[in-house]
Image (cartoon, coloured by chain):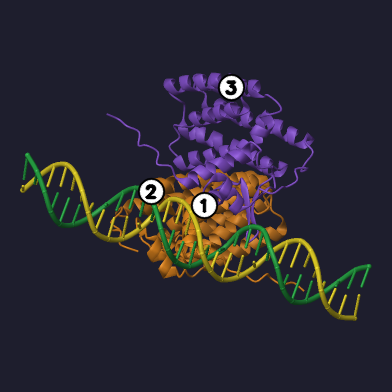
Chain colours: A purple, B orange, C green, D yellow
Amino acid sequence: MQLEPISRANLSDAAEAAIRAMIVDGRLPADQRLNEVHLAERLGVSRTPLREALNRLVSEGAVEARPRRGYFVKPLTLAEFDQLYDIRPILDPAALRLAGLPDARRLDRLEKLNRAFADARTPEDAIAQDDAWHMELIAACPNTVLIDLIASFCLRTRRYELALMREKALVARARDDHDDILKALRSDDLDAACLALEHNMRSGKAAIVDWLRTRATGATKAKRS
Amino acid sequence: MQLEPISRANLSDAAEAAIRAMIVDGRLPADQRLNEVHLAERLGVSRTPLREALNRLVSEGAVEARPRRGYFVKPLTLAEFDQLYDIRPILDPAALRLAGLPDARRLDRLEKLNRAFADARTPEDAIAQDDAWHMELIAACPNTVLIDLIASFCLRTRRYELALMREKALVARARDDHDDILKALRSDDLDAACLALEHNMRSGKAAIVDWLRTRATGATKAKRS
DNA sequence: CAATTGCCTATTGTATACAGTATGCAATTA
DNA sequence: TAATTGCATACTGTATACAATAGGCAATTG
């Protein structure tokens, strides 16, 4: 018989997930100082696993560490977003090229994921489905380092995408983009698929850039944790 | 007057650097278990900063963490190297393209660095100069996330390059590669420079792959820390 | 009154103590 | 003798105690 090993929870991982969720959905606003003692109390863990969690979030880019000053929620900036989204259209098509044309089973899964994406009720769900779609697209890529790298970029861009999705529903356009990519793949045209993928990432970027531009920058005053 | 702020040492950073050095130069062999208590004693720090250092090395890819089992020196594998070096020729030319043609001052610095590279006495020095050359080449790239990413790949590939350089001196070929890139840049031909850069990375890869293949894999038995 | 300096407090950096788990060995049983 | 089980031990995961530093406030001085 086949059993999943029961998850013996690890406090650092739990804290990391909890803090990331609070940052992503805005309960911890930009530039918020993260007081170790208060935050540890609120999460019901000690400072040791909390600090491990914070350090991982630093390497993920969600939190900034100023030595001997503390940890702060990294604000969303047009500059960072611009840079993150200039990298994805480099990485993703390269991964797809290495993956080659997907087999029939994967194509079916991609169509199913795209429908789930279109039907998503919440922004959180939509982004999760979109990420899942893109990861499935390149799942056959033999370069796992590249796959991990792309996955880490998914996490890093999530805050931006969520902030946008809260205001605008851009799912329809992205779903059509995905359909275009699938169509090219079904005609065994890898080059066209890569181009469409690049276009998908760049147009997604343009939408968020517009939104960040119109938004009054800053204005989120830091309060105590 | 201009003063450097004196470095108020941070034990985590110091430990991180010390452990990385020991891994890179082989004092800590592959698959070596890193006992927290022993290693902390040897470095003269407590377990807390040591663990922070180890966790950072994990995200750098030099160390592997098995939950509740401990930390281990990640062995060099052909598979990982293959993947790392398939990514650099994607990232570096993209960064160069974003950076555009370098100005005269940067070209001069590049030639100077290339001479220092050719004159390097030790493998460590040669690799440091090579990395410096590549980072200088893309220094004008406005995408700092991409630059940081490439820098992190430099660190991750360093162990492989050092292992190779210890046996073979491949500096001459790489120096000529660099010269080719510079020549293209001086003729204002960005496309040709990007192509030459890609070739430089791929041929470097081929050399190390050959070496890893001929080497008897494994054979480095793990001992206590 | 402005500027500087010294002290106080809050907070991070580090060390250590405690708890729980994985691994190896010995004892036991068939 | 082989297999299994219980136990001892060493190690990681977590909590907490201690040390050191940064920032603010007040006192002092010109």
Residue in the foreground of this view, choosing between B36 and D30: D30
Q: Is residue A178 above or below residue B11?
A: above
What count of labels does the image hold? 3
Q: In this view, does B45 lie above or below B186?
A: below
In this rendering, which labeled residue sits more in front, label 3 or label 2? Answer: 3
Instruction: Tell me the residue at 38%/54% (across/down).
Output: B70
- Circle 2 residue: B78
Per the image, label 2 sits on a secondary structure element best described as helix
Horizontal and vertical percent for residue B100?
A: 68, 47
Quarter that holds the N terminus of chain B: bottom right
- Specify whether residue A162 is in view: yes
Instruction: Tell me the residue at 71%/60% (across/down).
Output: B105
Q: Residues within 10 Å of mark 3 (few under 14, many from 20)?
A: some
Do the residues under discs 3 and 2 have CB atoms within 8 angstroms? no
Are the numbered discs 1 and 2 placed on the same chain, yes or no?
no
In this rendering, which labeled residue sits more in front, label 1 or label 3? Answer: 1
Q: Is residue A151 above or below residue A132?
A: below
- Circle 3 residue: A120
Chain that bears disc 2: B
Quarter that holds the C terminus of chain B: bottom left
Horizontal and vertical percent for residue B184?
A: 63, 50
Per the image, label 1 sits on a secondary structure element best described as loop
Do the residues under discs 1 and 3 have CB atoms within 8 angstroms? no
- Specify whether residue B74 is in view: no
Name the kind of residue labelled 1 in the image: Ser
- Circle 1 residue: A46
